[in-house]
């Protein structure tokens, strides 16, 4: 089961907790792309991989400061910080006390233990889905690269900000106008930049097909828009009902925690995407299309 690979990744992190952490190497260790590793880890562990490592290191640092005579300077370097100041700032944010205060008796510190991933399969819940096959598809899109580490990071708003920027600069309406009325659906496209890369591409676009004005699309390409192509693939399709992106994150979580363990499907490195319909069902935020294959 592919979800067990996350437990292997956690064990790897624990074994190398004092070393420089290269997440691309971790992904390679569990035979996943960096992109899919970060996405699966964040939804299964409910935190990013970097957050997990940071919490574990700060826990171990506090224990060592309490029980040994290690200096703050040496602790900072040992636990991956470039300066004592950056270490003290992170330490205080996590524990609520400074490294110096941690040495005192009665100091209140936080304990973050190693994670043990346990998937409990329970009956009675319903997760509607369908499997669709799509031949090669082409889109015209506005594309930007983002670091894999931001995937499902609650404190990062890079992608919503990208949408807001594109709307604010009137860059989305020209794409929608390429389509006939009633079929002006928007796509949120997502895929790794390349095998082993530390970034993924995210695109906002429309599909190119018989309902698209090809002449106008050529003009947009001269204005910085990009052609995005996908290979033939099978997709697991889920409807996300809600008023904001929270329902999308919830669907991704259920995909890894419920759909993958129970169906034997796993995500591939092909493009996944959301469809934001011009005219969708009441309460439908988007459809999520995840490229999958059988284990």
Image (tube, rainbow, N blue to C red):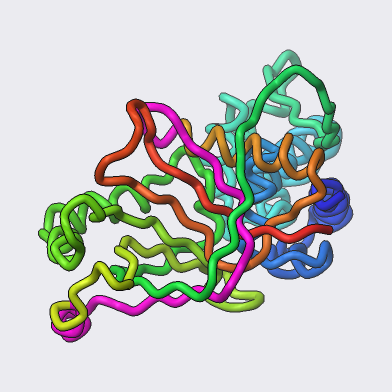
Quadrant assignment for the C terminus? bottom right
Relative image position of residue 252 (x, y in whole percent): 59, 41
Horizontally, residue 15 falls left or right of residue 293, namely right
Which residue is pictured at 13% across the width and 53% down the height? 168
Judging depth in this view, the residue of 133 and 34 nearest the camera is 133
* Magenta span contains residue 237: yes
Q: Is residue 196 above or below residue 271?
A: below
Residue 46 location, quadrant: top right
Relative image position of residue 259 (x, y in whole percent): 72, 40
Relative image position of residue 166 (x, y in whole percent): 20, 58
The residue most toward the front is 210
* Magenta span contains residue 91: no
Horizontally, residue 91 falls left or right of residue 17, namely left
Residue 195 location, quadrant: bottom right
Which residue is pictured at 62% across the width and 37% down the height? 253
Which residue is pictured at 78% across the width and 39% down the height? 60
Judging depth in this view, the residue of 84 and 15 nearest the camera is 15
Which residue is pictured at 55% across the width and 69% down the height? 192
Residue 270 location, quadrant: bottom right
Judging depth in this view, the residue of 121 and 119 nearest the camera is 121
Q: Is residue 179 above or below residue 102?
A: below
Relative image position of residue 265 (x, y in whole percent): 76, 52
The total of numbered circles placed on residues is 0
Judging depth in this view, the residue of 161 and 249 nearest the camera is 249
Range drawn in magenta: 217-246
């Amino acid at each position: 089961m592919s979800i067990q690979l996350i437990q292997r990744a956690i064990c790897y992190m624990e074994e190398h907790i004092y070393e420089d952490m290269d997440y691309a190497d971790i992904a390679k260790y569990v035979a996943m792309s960096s992109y899919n590793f970060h996405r699966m880890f964040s939804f299964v562990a409910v935190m990013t991989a970097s957050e997990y490592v940071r919490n574990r290191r700060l826990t171990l640092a506090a224990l060592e400061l309490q029980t040994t005579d290690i200096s703050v300077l040496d602790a900072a370097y040992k636990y991956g910080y470039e300066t004592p100041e950056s270490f003290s700032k992170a330490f205080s944010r996590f524990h609520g006390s400074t490294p110096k205060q941690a040495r005192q008796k009665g100091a209140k510190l936080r304990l973050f233990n190693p994670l043990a991933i346990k998937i409990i399969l329970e009956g009675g819940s319903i997760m509607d889905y369908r499997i669709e096959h799509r031949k090669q598809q082409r889109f015209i899109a506005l594309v930007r690269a983002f670091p894999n580490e931001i995937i499902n990071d609650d404190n990062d708003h890079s992608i919503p900000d990208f949408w807001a920027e594109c709307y604010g600069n009137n860059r989305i309406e020209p794409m929608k106008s390429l389509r006939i009325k009633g079929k002006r659906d928007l796509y949120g496209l997502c895929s790794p930049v390349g095998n082993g890369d530390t970034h993924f591409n995210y695109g906002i676009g429309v599909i190119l097909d018989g309902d698209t004005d090809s002449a106008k699309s050529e003009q947009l390409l001269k204005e910085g828009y990009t052609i995005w192509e996908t290979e033939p693939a099978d997709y697991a399709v889920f409807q996300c009902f809600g008023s904001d992106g929270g329902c999308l994150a919830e669907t991704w979580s259920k995909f890894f925690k419920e759909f993958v363990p129970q169906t034997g499907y796993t995500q591939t490195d092909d493009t996944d995407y959301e469809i934001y319909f011009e005219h969708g069902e009441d309460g439908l935020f988007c459809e999520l299309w995840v490229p999958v294959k059988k284990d």
